[in-house]
Image (cartoon, rainbow, N blue to C red):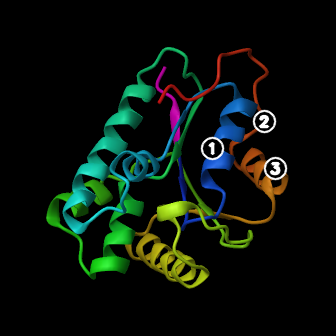
């Protein structure tokens, strides 16, 4: 059985990683971590424009590996997608390379969830810039989703409120006991 992949998108400091981890625990499944976070830690720098395609490809490849994992049954929660990488390319460099546009266009998720920027902005080393950038990224994300005709659900409030919103959308956990977590 192929899991339904659920994309969690949003600007920096909107709670995507916390939500993905909580959803995986609640639904007894795995989640795909945001590769960008690892990239920044390993390279001790923010990405450059020429890093964007590689970041998006790695994100998608890790997603595919976990989608094929026998421990994933109903859902796979994906903490960001190549579409989000393309959004950041638009914000920072005003353009998206053709290879990244192709990855963005392959956005094929059962549900797309957008984390609203309504949580307090928290600086997080090199990966976080400012509340102003967070708002610009959020606006750009909504513009891209609308332009591409991708339906999405905007999640608001604290973690428990967001968890309830997702449960209303995809249904309650089945209660089956499964290993959950993130192998990356």
Which residue is tagged 1?
Answer: 20
Secondary-structure class at tag 2: loop
Which residue is tagged 2?
Answer: 172
Secondary-structure class at tag 1: helix
Q: Which residues are magenta?
A: 1-5
Looking at the image, the residue that sits furthest to the front is 44
Percent x, y for residue 40? Answer: 40, 53
Which residue is tagged 3?
Answer: 164
The answer to which image quadrant residue 119 occupies is: bottom right
CA gap between label 1 and label 3 equals: 13 Å
In the rendered structure, which disc, 1 or 2, sits on the residue that comes first in sequence? 1
In the rendered structure, which disc, 1 or 3, sits on the residue that comes first in sequence? 1
Is 9 in front, or is 111?
9
In the rendered structure, which disc, 3 or 2, sits on the residue that comes first in sequence? 3
Q: Is residue 3 left or right of residue 178?
A: left
Q: Is residue 47 left or right of residue 112?
A: left
Q: Is residue 27 left or right of residue 35?
A: right
Percent x, y for residue 89? Answer: 31, 71
């Amino acid at each position: 059985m192929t899991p339904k992949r659920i994309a969690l998108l949003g600007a920096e400091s909107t709670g995507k990683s916390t939500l993905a981890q909580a959803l995986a625990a609640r639904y007894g499944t795995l989640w795909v971590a945001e590769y960008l976070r690892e990239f920044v830690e390993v390279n001790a720098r923010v990405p450059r424009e020429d890093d964007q395609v590689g970041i998006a490809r790695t994100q998608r490849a890790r997603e595919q590996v976990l989608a094929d994992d026998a421990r994933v049954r109903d859902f796979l929660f994906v903490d960001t997608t190549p579409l989000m990488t393309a959004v950041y390319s638009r914000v920072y460099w005003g353009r998206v390379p053709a290879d990244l546009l192709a990855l963005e266009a392959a956005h094929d998720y059962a549900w797309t969830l957008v984390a609203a920027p309504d949580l307090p902005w928290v600086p997080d080393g090199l990966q976080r810039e400012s509340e102003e950038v967070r708002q610009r990224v959020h606006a750009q994300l909504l513009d891209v989703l609308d332009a591409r005709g991708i339906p999405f659900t905007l999640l608001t409030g604290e973690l428990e409120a967001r968890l309830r919103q997702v449960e209303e959308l995809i249904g309650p956990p089945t209660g089956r006991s499964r290993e959950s977590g993130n192998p990356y």
